[in-house]
Image (spheres, helix red, strand yellow):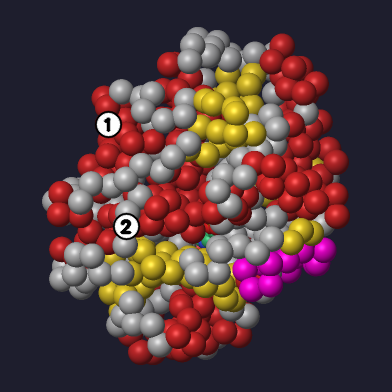
């Protein structure tokens, strides 16, 4: 399997090379030359999460040996997940929540970022690269922590995370600022997520800067969802979820299901699209946005227009105006038209908008306001005694609107992307619980009672952990601070 750039089809890399590079020099994203097909459902029914992972990764990363893939899978999907099943399913009515938040940082980013470091390490070895890898991360909250955890003390790597100073939840902030590990750096940014993402993209594209780093023994790589090594592991849970629904008798083999995904950078929903193209019987992709409804508008009208104010919402991981992976989706659904991508992306960067009518049959776009998020969190709790986080509630709301509009009764898999504990403030307010104080940890306690469970220990202990990172910078200084943090030079061992 070779990988092309969305902006240059003639580029041809192995999976390992694409993972190391993260993004193509031409600004494009790496995409597989073709989408492999799953074996028949009946041949996969007895597979564990890890076995499905091995099978899917093996199809995409053909330059890896099966032992290399097996080892990465075993190191990634182990007891650091709270559940043996890795992704537990919770069925409510005609929907099932794929709970993707039982990893070490309580958000779905763990699904891919617990394996990416092992894929990257293997790729480096295979390609004879001796430089130290610097993972640059722009985060709206969850990727940062998951990357820090995933790469913490992995030899030959350093991680530098930029998060928007006012754009993450108190728990996310605390999770990142208390990060341990010799090779981890966390920087608060005076700006929003798009500033962070732009700054990081600029560093990747800056030849002189990369040369300078090269002289110090460093090479940049990315753990953002632009890295194909993030995307491929996300296909696994859709396949796993469908198989489990069949095994539990909820759907029959071959029944069509819909997928509802709370969407920001379009990575998670793109993985569902890949799963569909691989042969999983997915009918609709319900693309759910919050008040930053740029994708809803795009799919409804064909106009992608970023000339608007980014809003800060209760689902911060979706507070995005530049949805990077949409580029991959347009590439695939336009018949791999790299010239079209060059044209549209240059319009976006120069004018701030472009027009393109994406395929209408595949994607149902909708959005949830802050009031709707609260309403559905409260409603589901009342009806089913089940509590969702605000991101998942965005997807649930879009799903409900879709059902109302179409009367479609296909079973729906809802990507449940974060633990409610990570966003306890909004959840408690939605449930009408008056918080006694402003204290985050008191809120966790209150929420745990409503959830009939215990606050996960990794979150409870945050309260007493010391803050270890105190860098703050403006978007224009991201390059400078990166050089400053790396000034000691690479360590070779
Ligand atoms: C990252 C994230 C999303 C958005 O996922 P994309 O792949 O960027 O579309 C949604 N919910 C949570 C909790 C996240 O962390």
The spot of residue 91 in percent (x, y) is 28, 74
Q: Is residue 455 above or below residue 147?
A: below
Residue situated in front as seen by the camera: 364 or 315? 364
**What are the residue bounds of the magenta stretch?**
298-313
Residue at image location 76% in from the left, 37% down from the top: 202
Q: Is residue 159 above or below residue 175?
A: above
Residue 18 visible in the snapshot: yes
The spot of residue 228 in percent (x, y) is 51, 39
Q: Under 8 Å from ligand 1: the CB of mark 2? A: no
Numbered marks: total = 2
Pointer 2 or 1: first along the chain? 1
Q: Quadrant of the N terminus?
A: top left
Disc on res. 280: 2
Dot 2 falls on a residue whose secondary structure is: loop
Disc on res. 70: 1
- Answer left or right for 37 relative to 470: left
Residue situated in front as seen by the camera: 432 or 480? 480
The spot of residue 274 in percent (x, y) is 43, 51
């Amino acid at each position: 399997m070779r990988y092309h750039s969305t902006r240059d089809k003639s580029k041809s890399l192995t999976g390992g090379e694409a993972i190391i590079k993260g993004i193509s020099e031409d600004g494009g994203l790496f995409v597989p030359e073709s989408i492999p097909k799953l074996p028949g459902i009946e041949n996969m029914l007895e597979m564990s999460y890890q076995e499905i992972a091995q099978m899917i990764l093996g199809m995409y990363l053909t330059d890896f040996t099966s032992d290399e893939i097996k080892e990465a899978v075993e190191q990634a999907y182990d007891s650091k997940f709270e559940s043996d099943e890795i992704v537990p399913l919770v069925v409510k009515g005609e929907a099932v929540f794929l709970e993707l938040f039982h990893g070490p940082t309580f958000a779905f980013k763990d699904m891919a970022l617990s394996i990416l470091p092992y894929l990257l390490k293997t790729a480096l070895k295979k390609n004879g690269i001796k430089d130290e890898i610097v993972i640059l991360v722009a985060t709206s909250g969850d990727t940062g922590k998951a990357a820090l955890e995933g790469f913490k003390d992995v030899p030959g790597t350093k991680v530098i995370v930029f998060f928007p100073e006012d754009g993450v939840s108190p728990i996310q902030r605390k999770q990142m600022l208390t990060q341990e590990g010799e090779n981890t750096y966390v920087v608060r940014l005076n700006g929003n997520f798009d500033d962070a993402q732009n700054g990081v993209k600029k560093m990747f594209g800056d030849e002189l800067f990369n040369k300078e780093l090269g002289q110090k023994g460093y090479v940049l790589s990315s753990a953002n969802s632009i890295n194909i090594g993030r995307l491929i592991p996300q296909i696994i849970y859709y396949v796993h979820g469908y198989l489990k629904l069949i095994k539990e008798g909820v759907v029959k083999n071959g029944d069509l299901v819909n997928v509802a995904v709370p969407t920001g950078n379009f990575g998670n929903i793109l993985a569902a699209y890949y799963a569909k193209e691989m042969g999983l019987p997915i009918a609709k992709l319900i693309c759910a946005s919050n008040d930053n409804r740029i994708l809803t508008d795009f799919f409804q009208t064909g106009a992608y227009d970023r000339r608007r104010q980014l809003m800060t919402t209760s689902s911060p991981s979706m507070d995005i105006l530049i949805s990077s992976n949409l580029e991959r989706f347009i590439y695939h659904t336009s018949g791999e038209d790299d010239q079209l991508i060059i044209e549209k992306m240059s319009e976006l960067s120069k004018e701030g908008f472009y027009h393109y009518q994406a395929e209408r049959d595949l994607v149902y776009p909708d959005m949830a306001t802050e009031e709707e998020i609260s309403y559905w969190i409260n409603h589901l709790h009342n009806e089913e005694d089940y509590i969702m986080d605000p991101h998942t509630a965005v997807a649930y709301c879009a799903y409900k609107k879709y059902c109302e509009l179409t009367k479609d009764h296909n079973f729906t898999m809802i990507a449940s992307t974060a633990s409610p504990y990570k966003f306890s403030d909004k959840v408690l307010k939605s449930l009408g619980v008056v918080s006694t104080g402003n204290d985050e940890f008191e809120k966790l306690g209150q929420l745990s009672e409503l959830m009939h469970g215990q606050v996960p220990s990794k979150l409870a202990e945050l309260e007493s952990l010391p803050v270890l990172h105190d860098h703050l910078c403006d978007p224009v200084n991201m390059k400078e601070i990166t050089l400053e943090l790396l000034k000691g030079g690479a360590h070779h061992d």
